[in-house]
Structures are given as C-alpha cells and as structure tokens.
Image (cartoon, helix red, strand yellow):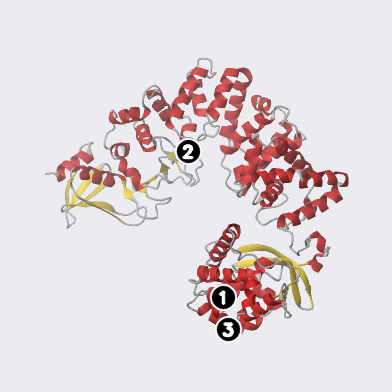
C-alpha cells in the first residue's frame, strides 16, 4: 500500500481490518491542550478543515502519514496527532450512523490502557455524547461509563477539549458526513506511506527520543538533508552539520524563538524552490527526491547562513529572515534569490559590491509585476544571468548590458541611473535618497525624464531633478497619495490623464495601491509614465507653499466646459464614491461614460452625467432618483418631479410619463441648463 491508494481516514480504516493503532511508544494526544500556542494551532486547523469541507478553499492536504503496516494492522510512527483529530471529526460526523461503528472501532490507542478503553467507550456512546444539550465534555464526565481516574490521562483531557471545539465549529454543517465521504472532492486528504514499501530504513524518516516523541518535520528534513550531504560531499558534511546545530540554529532562534524550526525549514524551502528543485514550498519537506539536491545548494546555504550569522544586523539579513516569518511573496522570493546568489558567487564574502547588487535587483524586482509562476521563474532566470556580473553589476548596467526577466522600463531607468552614478557623486547621493521613498520603491524615472527635458545637452541636471522629485515627494506618503481625490481632480484640469486597464474596455483614474493588486494601473504608474499632464501639474505647484491649498486653487481656477466629461469629476467629487477605490474604473457604453462600481461593468453601473446632474440638483435642494438596469448597455435615467431625464450625445432630454419628448438642452452647459429648467 502507498499514497496512491490511501488518501482519507475512511480509506485508511477500511484498509486495516485489525485496527489503526497508536503505539505505546508514542506521546499523548496534544492538539487539545489549553496553552495559547496549541489553541492557536487548533483554531487555525479546524477553520482550515471547515473551509475545505465547505469548498470555500481547495482540499486540505495534511501531508504524509507513515508507519508500519503488517497483518492488516497499521502502526503510525508519524501523523498520530492529525489522525486523532481526523478520527474525532469523523466520530462527530457519523454520530448517528450505526453502519460506521465497526469501522470507527478500528482506531485505538495503546499509549495507555485508559486511553484505549476511553476511545472504545467514546465510539460506543457517541450518539449521547454529541446530541446532548450539554457540551460533549460535560456529557462525558457526567456519564456512568466515565471512570474518574481518566481525568489524569493527558490524551483524554486533550480529546475532551477537541470534541467540544469540533461540535462548536462544525455544528452548523448539516451534511457533514456525506461531504467527508465525497469521493469526487475529498476535502481532507493525506498521503499514506508504508515504511517497508519505501525500501529505506526507518531511521531515515523517524527517530524516537527517550519518551517516544517523533521528530518534527524540520528534524526529519535535517536527517535526510545530512544523509544526502554525506553521500555527495562526505568531507564537507561534518563542518556543515556543526554549523547547522550551532551558529545557524542560534541565528533562527534569535529571529523567532517559538517557531524557530519553522523559519529554519522555510529558509531551505524558499532556497530549493528558487533552485527549481521543488515546485512549491508549502508542505514540501518530505515530498520530494532528496537526490535532486546538488552541491550548489549546499554551498549556497553554507555561505548564506554563515554570512547572515556574522552580519545579523545587515539589511540583507533583516530582509531575508523577515520574509520567512510568513509565506513569502513572489518578489520576496526573487530578492531572497538575489541574496543567496551573490553569496554563492562571492563564497560568502562582501567585496564592497553587495549593496550595489542588492540595490539594483531590488529596484528591478519591486517595479516589475511578478504575480504568477511564469513571471517569477523569468525573474529568477534573469537574476541567474546577472550573476556573471555579481562583483560589479553597476558597471554592467552603465554599459547597457542585456537584462531579461524584468520590466524593460525599469531596466532602462537603472541603466540611466548607473551612468549618472558612475560619473557624478553628488547626483548619485540625490538618486539614492530619492530611491528611499517607500511608495515608489526605487522608481524615480519621471523626475529624471523631466530633468533631461529641461537640459540643453540631453543630460539631466541635478537641481532640476531634485526640484521635480521634491514636488513628487510632497504629493505622496509612504503608502498612498497625500491628497488623492484632490490631486486627481487637479490633474483632470490639465487633461485626460486616465490609463487603459489591461482588458482595453476600461479606463481608470488610477488607484492608490502602488502594488496594483487589482490589476488596475496606479498613480505610481501614472507618474512613472513621464506624461505631459503630470509635468504640467508639477510645473504649477511649488514646495515652498502649502500643496493642499495649491491643488484647491488649481481646481478653483480651472475653466473646463461642462460638455467635457472631466468637468463632472472636477465639479462634483462625490462621483468618486460611486466607484470602488480598488478599481476607479470608467467605461464608454453607447458613446457615453459610465461609472463602474466594481471591477467589471456586468452589474449596476451609473451614467456619469446623470449622476453629476443629481449632485447639482441636491445642491439646489431638489430631490431625484437614479434608475438603471443591470449590465453595460442598458437604460439609465433620472426621475425628478414629473420628468424622466436621460443624457445622450452631449444633451439632456426630458420626457413625460407617456414618453413624449418635452425638451432637450441646447447649450454647451447642459448641467446648468437642465437645473435651470427644473427650477422654473
């Protein structure tokens, strides 16, 4: 038997007619303990299980369960905790299903006689336990079959806590049993491995300490990793293992004492994923062929971890270890690869070029969309190709070297900056300072571009650059624009600055989020495009005066005709509220602009001019109601007094209840004309 045939608890229990038996050498069941860490783990596990059962998330993979199988009995040596929790959930799900009783009796504990007897009684009396008005634990303790001495059994105490939580979490799922038995979906799965079928000695997978506690996934990984190293580089193994257990362990312990082994394991997960040895670093540590680990992996980890230990306060160390606390993003993985690649090439020595290497690749990474596997792999390959120039990447960019895997615009910017940095120390300092702005993450090409435009010899002037950059900095905080709506309205006074969304059907007023998580262009991208409208705004404001007041003055002095759609947003800022701040999308439908409340225009959208007219009427104290149907090309109108008002081809039309046309606006001030008509 192997993982190809057994994936669920019911399959495991069905496969072994002579019981699934937790051996006496195993530790007690612990997932029901009441300490804060265990509570957090338990709550997260049950929540993840419920989400998978309800199909809110993909099936939950509980990783490998392995042990000895013989004489139709299975003795797990790793996976006891997960199997017990799964069993208790199935016990609750099949509480009134007598046909499953024989199957459930096959799960037993041999750690203590009391534990074995308790599980048997719990299975036998599960209907009363789980259908009582009392909590399961209260019902059990008050029952005649409960032995008072069982209160001292730590496994039983943990079970009592867990079954209370299981009933609380899963009590609202009326069809829990059929969901667990769904062969097509299988919400809760694991991979069964028979140690004998694996053809390798037990010690390679599991070691038991004096109390019978199995090694953690990290300890199992370490045993197999060192085993591979002894075959591949036997002379290097002793030194590597020494550092593994001393200096490197201290490094991760200082970072995260309570979960240092998880962070330690995550380091190797990201490293192996970047090297292409594993496809994913989620539940990965025993799920791949250790023979794929090559000498480069061991050298890279050796040089990297030694450097981080000796330079624990460095930017590289803080970034890399910080990224491991949670599951890293694609950009974090690429930057992780940049650190480890440099240290592999330099054999763990910073010859003075490390900071230059990291600065350039960080700028490239943070300003390139890396949001899927394909883009991530291209970026990793791009770093690998740049590794030939690890000792002087700045010079390579100065000379216009070929770069792949990253945004072409950002590559060109880095090449331009490299040429400036190499020949002008003062300008270099100004560039480094500008790159520290967290909103732009090293992307400063608009200020460079405008500085070149103002030069005679096509070389940017440092004073002009700083002038533009100081103005840009005055408009943005660390994570968003300081005057978002006001700045957008001011930009509209200079022209249509909107950007096209990838789908081509939408325009956006540009979202705040510089990471563009909704795939909608941001204000960061608008400013990086070096457009004329942005330049006009920057040329109009100064950093000596209050920027907020200057923006208000720009808007107040604007002379935009009412039949220009920009007028609606400039004059009636509440229209911004009719669009999601994550999208700020517009679309043309039948020749007219509509406001899209969400990402797509399949819902209820608003006609721009109808919404603007309603705002104008509110200012005059006139009540009205907007009507619209669902979809992009549908009828939208305003009901006010006895009229129905629509907007087409630059004109408002008024019709009566019978549909007869009463009047159309005629001037280039349709909103004013419509309001005056209704005030008669």
User: Is 351 above or below relative to 156?
Assistant: above
| Circle 2: element type | loop
- Count of marks placed on residues: 3
Residue at image point 63% right, 63% down:
61
The local crowd at label 2, few if under 14, some if 14 to 19, many if 20 or more residues have their Cα within 10 Å, is some
In which quadrant will I find the C terminus? top left
- Identify the residue under disc 1: 92
Residue at image point 16% right, 41% down:
676
- Which is more toward the observer, 22 or 513? 22
Q: Is residue 225 left or right of residue 182?
A: right
Q: CA distance from mark 2 to mark 1?
A: 48 Å
**Callouts 2 and 3 close, C-beta under 8 Å:** no
- Identify the residue under disc 2: 479
Residue 562, position as x, y percentages in the image: 26, 36
Q: Earlier in the sequence, mark 2 or mark 3?
A: 3
Residue 149, located in which quarter of the rendered image?
bottom right
| Circle 3: element type | loop
Residue 386, numbered label: none
Residue 193 in sight here: no
Q: Is residue 432 left or right of residue 450?
A: right
Marks 2 and 3: which is nearer the front?
3
Q: CA distance from mark 1 to mark 3?
A: 20 Å
In which quadrant will I find the N terminus? bottom right
The local crowd at label 1, few if under 14, some if 14 to 19, many if 20 or more residues have their Cα within 10 Å, is many
**Callouts 1 and 3 close, C-beta under 8 Å:** no
Residue 325, position as x, y percentages in the image: 62, 47
Marks 2 and 1: which is nearer the front?
1
- Identify the residue under disc 3: 144
């Amino acid at each position: 038997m192997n993982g190809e045939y057994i994936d669920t608890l019911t399959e495991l229990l069905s496969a072994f007619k002579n019981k699934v038996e937790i051996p006496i050498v195993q530790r007690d069941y612990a997932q029901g303990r009441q300490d804060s860490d265990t509570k957090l783990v338990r709550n997260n596990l049950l929540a993840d299980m419920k989400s998978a059962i309800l199909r809110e998330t993909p099936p939950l993979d509980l990783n490998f369960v392995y042990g000895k199988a013989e004489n139709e009995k299975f003795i797990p040596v790793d996976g006891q905790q997960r199997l017990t929790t799964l069993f208790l959930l199935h016990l609750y799900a099949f509480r009134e299903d007598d046909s499953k009783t024989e199957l459930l009796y096959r799960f037993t504990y041999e750690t203590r006689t009391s534990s074995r007897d308790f599980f048997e009684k719990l299975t036998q009396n599960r209907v009363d336990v789980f259908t009582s008005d009392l909590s399961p634990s209260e019902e059990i303790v008050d029952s005649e079959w409960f032995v008072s001495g069982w209160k001292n059994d730590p496994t039983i105490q943990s079970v009592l806590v867990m079954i209370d939580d299981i009933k609380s979490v899963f009590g609202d799922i009326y069809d829990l049993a059929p969901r667990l038995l769904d062969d097509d979906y299988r919400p809760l799965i694991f991979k069964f491995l028979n140690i004998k079928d694996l053809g390798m000695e037990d010690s390679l997978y599991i070691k038991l300490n004096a109390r019978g506690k199995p090694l953690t996934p990290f300890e199992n990984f370490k045993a197999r990793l060192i085993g591979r190293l002894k075959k591949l580089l036997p002379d290097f193994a002793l030194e590597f293992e020494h550092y593994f257990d001393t200096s490197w362990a201290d490094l991760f312990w200082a970072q995260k004492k309570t979960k240092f082994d998880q962070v330690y394991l995550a380091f190797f997960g990201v490293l192996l994923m970047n090297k292409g040895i594993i496809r994913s670093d989620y539940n990965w540590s025993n799920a791949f062929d250790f023979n794929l680990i090559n000498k480069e992996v061991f050298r890279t980890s050796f040089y990297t971890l030694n450097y981080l230990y000796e330079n624990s306060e460095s930017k590289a160390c803080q970034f890399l270890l910080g990224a491991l606390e949670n599951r890293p993003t694609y950009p974090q993985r690429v930057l992780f690869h940049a650190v480890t690649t440099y240290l592999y090439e330099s054999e763990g020595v910073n010859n003075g070029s490390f900071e230059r290497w990291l600065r350039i690749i960080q700028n490239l990474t943070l300003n390139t969309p890396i949001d899927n596997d394909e883009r991530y792999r291209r970026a990793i390959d791009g770093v690998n190709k740049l590794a030939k120039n690890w000792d002087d990447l700045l010079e390579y960019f100065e000379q216009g070297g070929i770069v792949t895997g990253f945004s072409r615009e950002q590559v060109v910017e880095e090449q331009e900056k490299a040429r400036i940095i190499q020949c002008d120390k003062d300008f270099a300092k100004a560039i480094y300072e500008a790159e520290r702005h967290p909103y732009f993450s090293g992307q400063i090409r608009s200020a460079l571009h405008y500085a070149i435009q103002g030069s005679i010899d096509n070389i940017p002037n440092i004073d002009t650059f700083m002038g533009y950059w100081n103005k840009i900095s005055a408009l943005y905080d660390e994570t968003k624009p300081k005057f978002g709506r006001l700045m957008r309205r001011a930009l509209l006074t200079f022209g249509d600055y909107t950007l096209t969304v990838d789908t081509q059907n939408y325009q956006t007023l540009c979202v705040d989020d510089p990471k563009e998580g909704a795939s909608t262009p941001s204000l960061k991208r608008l400013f990086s495009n070096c457009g004329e409208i942005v330049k006009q705004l920057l040329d109009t404001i100064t950093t000596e005066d209050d920027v907020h007041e200057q923006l208000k003055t720009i808007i107040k002095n604007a002379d935009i005709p009412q039949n220009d759609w920009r007028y609606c947003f400039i004059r009636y800022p509440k229209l911004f509220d009719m669009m999601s701040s994550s999208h700020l999308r517009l679309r043309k439908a039948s020749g007219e602009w509509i406001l899209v409340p969400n990402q797509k225009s399949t819902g209820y959208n608003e006609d721009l001019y109808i919404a603007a007219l309603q705002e104008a009427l509110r200012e005059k104290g006139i009540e009205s109601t907007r009507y619209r149907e669902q979809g992009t090309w549908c009828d939208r109108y305003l009901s006010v007094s006895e009229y129905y008002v629509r907007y087409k081809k630059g004109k408002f039309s008024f019709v009566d209840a019978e549909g007869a046309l009463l009047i159309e606006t005629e001037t280039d001030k349709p909103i004013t004309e419509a309001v005056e008509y209704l005030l008669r």
